[in-house]
Amino acid sequence: MQLITLCFVFVLSLCTFTVVKCQAVKCPVIQADKNVLVIGDSEDATFGNVIQFECQSNQMFLKGPTEIDCNDRGEWSGIVPTCEEIKCYVPNIVHGFVTGSQEEFKENDILRYGCSKNYTPFSRSSRCTKIGNKATWSPPPECEAVKCPVIQADKNVLVIGDSEDATFGNVIQFECQSNQMFLKGPTEIDCNDRGEWSGIVPTCEEIKCYVPNIVHGFVTGSQEEFKENDILRYGCSKNYTPFSRSSRCTKIGNKATWSPPPECEERTCAPPDDTLVKYGRWERRWRTGRFEEKKYYQCIFGYKPTNGATFAECTNDGTWTPNPLCQKITCAAPHDNLVSHTSLTRWRTGKLNDQNYYQCKPGYKPTKDATFAKCTIDGTWTPNPLCEASCPDPPTIENGEAVPKLVDKDGIAIVVSYTCPKSYTLTSPK
């Protein structure tokens, strides 16, 4: 019985082996849109088979994958695409804007656009175009930052900054490679919103100066061109004076120039800084004067114009003469032989309104019975003269005359005698 059972199992196994077998996994048949061209056999597609897609018309574009493959699970690797009419839509343009109100465009339709300030269009228009398997804008509607052209500078010019990719607002600076040269042109330029440089590219030239035009002046010598450190000598017309006797050809900053400037200044005299001077009769204040100009002036109390001057004159050296303008009023000791001095009243030089007590020699007295001499504004002592004879003039007689009998060393009679003419006789007073 056991043997029969084993045989039955063996026979059953043989039967099962002949019926069961392994089959390749298949992917489902692809159902594509009528406008889609399917390249490949999807009806018996197994693992690894590839199906490609194209549109039946060039006026359409494929929306979806261009190919899919059957994987080991019996599934396609992507969706079945469709073919749609070529259409483009209003794009988002960074720093730009679309002109017009159209929102949907067909193949070959034109998109026109502009750009914000400081930006420029990549192209003025873009066309709705099929590129590969998609609809797109060609060339791309883009806005680029405005660029300025690359700077081509002379070999002697040092360019500071990058001009190869310069856009609006970028600044380029310039210097000379050598200190023996100067920059002819701007020291810096900037890129403006039109893509242009704000100035020309400078050059570097050897330092040279030329004969300048000097107002009211002239250059001495015949040299017309000067190198660095050469000296220019010049003079000035009448009534003008040089700012300096010479000027040097010098590099100052980025240019060659004369230093100090060769200029002629009008000869003038500043108002005198003199506290002893007061303003003239017809002037409220003293103004700057020109060469050889005259100004009438007065001095404060106690002072007088120096050397008796009646006016001040502006001189070549920029000062007023006389110099000083005012001097103190003084009265020198009088050289008067009729004045005697005592040890107690030694006579010294006096200033205005000073008083000096004095004595006169015997036979004389102070004029007008003055008790002292006073220094006056004209620089003399008063009274003037200081002394006079003590005796009055001798009396006169009728028909006779007084004859000096004794005179002092100053010729003043101190004794007189009287004489009468013939047929007259002298009588004594009663």
Image (cartoon, rainbow, N blue to C red):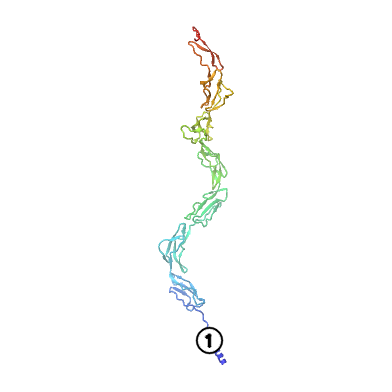
Q: Quadrant of the N terminus?
A: bottom right
Q: Residue at x 47, y 58 (%)?
A: 119
* 221 up-or-down from 412: above or below: below
User: Which residue is outermost to the top?
Assistant: 423
Residue 380 in view of the camera: no
User: Which residue is outermost to the left?
Assistant: 101
Depth check: give the residue in front, 202 or 270.
270
Depth check: give the residue in front, 424 or 246.
424
Q: Amino acid at mark 1?
A: Thr
* 117 up-or-down from 299: above or below: below
Picture quadrant where residue 221 is located: top right
* 30 up-or-down from 288: above or below: below
Q: Residue 158's spot in the image, x, y percent?
A: 55, 52
Which residue does the numbered mark 1 point to in the structure image? 16
User: Element at badge 1?
Assistant: helix
Picture quadrant where residue 358 is located: top right
Depth check: give the residue in front, 378 or 360.
360
Q: Residue 415's spot in the image, x, y percent?
A: 54, 13
